[in-house]
Amino acid sequence: MDEILKYFPQLTDRQKEQFAALGTLYPEWNEKINVISRKDIDNLYVNHILHSLAIARFMTPVSGTRFLDMGTGGGLPGVPLAIMFPDCSFHLIDRIGKKIKVAQSIAEAIGLTNVTSQHGDIGECRDKYDFVVSRAVMRLDQLVPLVKKNISHVNRNAYGNGLICLKGGDLTGEMGKYRSEVMEFDLSTYFSEPFFETKKLIYLPL
C-alpha cells in the first residue's frame, strides 16, 4: 500500500480504504481461484496494482470517459483504475468466467459503482468506448483488429481515443504496420522499482 501512496499522495480517504482492501481481497480470492501467480501474490501492490496504475501516470481522463478492459482476468488494470478515476466507467471483459467473477466480486466488495463486467469474447462486445486497455493480453497486431470496432469516434481527452497496453520486453516484432503510429513509454520513467525496468506502456490512437 505504501507504494501506491508514494506515487499517488493525493488519494482521498475513500480511495486509500479501497486500495488497502485489495491487499486482503486478492490473496483471499487467489486461494480459491488463481488469477495471480501464487509465487507473485506477495508482490501484489508493485507488480500488479502499481503496474495497472501506470495508465494513471500516462493520462488523467476527463469525467465520463469510458474504458473497456479487454482480457481483464481478475480485474487488472480495470479495478485499480476504477478506484483512481471514480468519475469514469470501466467495463471488464474476459472469456474465463471464474476470473471475471473474481473481478466483479472485488469491485462490489470495495463499493465500486463505476464497474460493469461481462463473461465472454471481445467479439460479443459491441459497445463503444474512449479507450481499450489491456495488460499483457496478446500481441498488438492481433489485438488491434479485435478492438477497433469498440473505439468511439468522439474524442474528449487530450489523447485521442485508442488502445493503451501494458507490456514488457522487446515489442519490435508485434508492432507490425502500426509502428509509425505507436507511442511507447518506459515505465521506469514513472516508477523507480526494479520491476518496471523492462516494462512499457503502448498507446495507439484508433
Image (cartoon, helix red, strand yellow):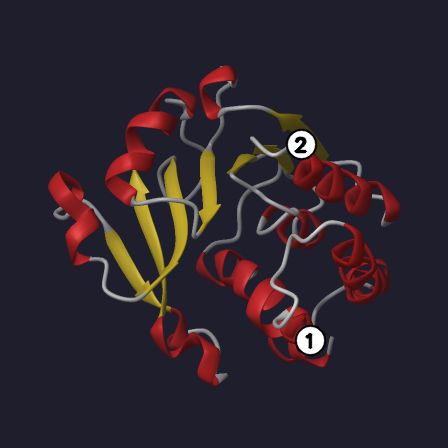
Which image quadrant: the N terminus? bottom right
> Tag 1: residue type?
Asp
Determine whether the residue tagged by mark 2 lies in a helix, strand or loop.
Answer: helix
Determine whether the residue tagged by mark 1 lies in a helix, strand or loop.
Answer: helix
Of the numbered discs in the image, which one, if any, rests on residue 42?
Answer: 1
Q: State the image quarter where residue 155 is shown.
A: top left
Is 185 displayed left or right of 69 in the figure? left
Q: Say above or below: 159 vs 146.
A: below
The residue shown at (60%, 51%) is 76
The residue shown at (33%, 49%) is 203
Mark with earlier residue (2, 1): 1
Is 78 displayed left or right of 54 in the figure? right
Which residue occupies the foreground of this view, 30 or 5?
30
Q: Position of residue 108 (x, y in %)?
A: 84, 41
Q: Position of residue 42 (x, y in %)?
A: 69, 75
Whole-angstrom CA distance, mark 2 to mark 1, is 24 Å
Name the residue that disc number 2 marks.
97
Tag count: 2
Q: Position of residue 38 (x, y in %)?
A: 66, 66
Task: Answer few, some or many: residues within 10 Å of disc 2's Cα (few below 14, many 20 plus, some between 14 and 19).
Answer: few
> Tag 2: residue type?
Gly
The residue shown at (48%, 21%) is 128
Which image quadrant: the C terminus? top left
Is 36 displayed left or right of 59 in the figure? right
Which residue occupies the foreground of this view, 174 or 187?
174
The residue shown at (47%, 78%) is 195
Of the numbered discs in the image, which one, if any, rests on residue 64?
Answer: none
Task: Answer few, some or many: residues within 10 Å of disc 1's Cα (few below 14, many 20 plus, some between 14 and 19).
Answer: few
